[in-house]
Amino acid sequence: MDGPILPYGRQTIEDDDIAAVVEALKADFLTTGPRVEAFERAFAETVGARHAVACSNGTAALHLAMLALDVQPGEVVIAPSITFLATANCARYVGADVVFADVDPDSGLMTPQTLADAIERVGERRLRAVLPVHLRGDARDLPALAALARGAGAVLVEDAPHALGTTAKFGNVTQTIGDVRHSAMATFSFHPVKTIATGEGGMVTTNDDRLEGRLRSLRSHGMVRPPDADPWWYEMPEPGFNYRLPDILCALGQSQLAKLPRFAARRRTLASAYEAALAPLAPVVRIAARPAWSDPVLHLMCVLIDFPAVGRTRRQVVDDLRARGVGTQVHYIPVHRQPYYRGLYGDLSLPGAEAWYARCLSLPLYPGMADGDVEEVADALRDVLGA
Ligand SMILES: *Cc1c(COP(=O)(O)O)cnc(C)c1O
């Protein structure tokens, strides 16, 4: 392939996005201004939630969710092992323990079975939250996971940065990820590789007024203003953080959000093109398994490669693809294997996560890809694998 390397993901910033930021820079408030609320309202409307609370990034969103639930030291949060570090780390920020759930080896997703197994490992401790991750963008089995969590006295907090725009049909009901129909909260990230970008940025959605109030005060130092207080007065019932998202970035977020339908359509078109282009490479290369109820806006194009069958290591394949202009990434190294978590919890056996990790590779997927790029990636992959 000629020209620069195709990355596995990339933002799409256009002139009107830049104009929106410039306008915000010329306005009165660089931090807490009218664009924060405007972005929050637009986001809540887009995903169908009652409230959306903007914050500094997706990790802060997860931390705020744990704080809003008042998760305490010694309590337990369940996270899948195949996710980004932050999904597990947010429990540690509040002193809670993480029980890692295994995943289905072909979709990378926590399932009702792997969640039930993780709930057994909670033992006598108090389980507070289960964090389903809509890995790649495919919706989890939310009604079943919510029922299991509820049965164990816990709630769902969806870690949803991969699934902005994804819809799912359970029974006769079609829901949008983020409408938190089955969960207490959902968190999002606007990191440049995610579906919309603000650089750093995050959001928490909830339908619960009390949680919304807590998210808002904890985002800004734990400060609350009683309704009839003097203009300078604030109170701090508990310490919070400075996790605000500036007006400047909210301007960018709102401009980007307006493009979600176009970005989503483009991601869906590219995903279909990949399905067609990669079909001849089966069974050596398979696209990650898709749950039947999910209509995803894929964030990641994860394929599963049988490296032993072609006699090549993943490292060789990654290097050779890069030499042909194709960037890739691995989503993810199982979090339970990280030195920190091994130190805390020892060596766990999560065979589904290991089987996913051994085969997964994320190929380029972002709206700015040219029409011919998918075909070129598939050709490069065929050559490199000798398939
Ligand atoms: C990106 C991501 C995060 C963290 O978001 P940041 O904005 O980078 O802090 C957390 N969880 C998942 C699943 C993510 O993809």
Image (cartoon, rainbow, N blue to C red):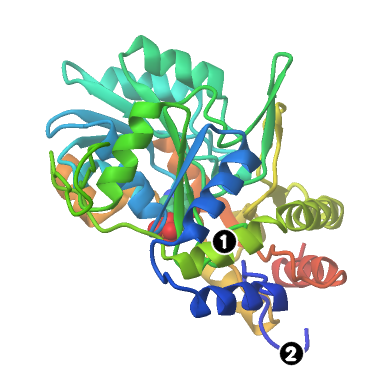
Between 165 and 382, the one lying in front of the other is 165
Quarter of the N terminus within the rendering: bottom right
Classify mark 1: helix, strand or loop: helix
Where is residue 108 drawn, in percent x and y? 54, 40
Three-letter residue code for mark 1: Gly
Crowd band around label 1 with a 10 angstrom C-alpha radius: few (<14), some (14–19), many (20+): many
Q: Residue 294 occupies which quadrant of the picture?
A: top right
101 vs 50, left or right, is left
Disc 2 target residue: 3
Q: Earlier in the sequence, mark 2 or mark 1?
A: 2
Where is residue 326 drawn, in percent x and y? 67, 75
- Residue 114 has which mark? none
At x 65%, y 56%, the residue is 257
At x 77%, y 70%, the residue is 369
Q: Is mark 2 within 8 Å of ligand 1?
A: no
Q: Identify whether 132 is placed above or below 217.
A: above
Between 311 and 173, the one lying in front of the other is 173
335 vs 177, left or right, is left
At x 80%, y 56%, the residue is 274
Total label count? 2
Quarter of the C terminus within the rendering: bottom right
Disc 1 target residue: 253
At x 35%, y 45%, the residue is 62
Q: Identify whether 207 is placed above or below 356.
A: above
Where is residue 252 drawn, in percent x and y? 57, 67
Q: Identify whether 201 is placed above or below 317.
A: above
- The residue furthest bottom is 3
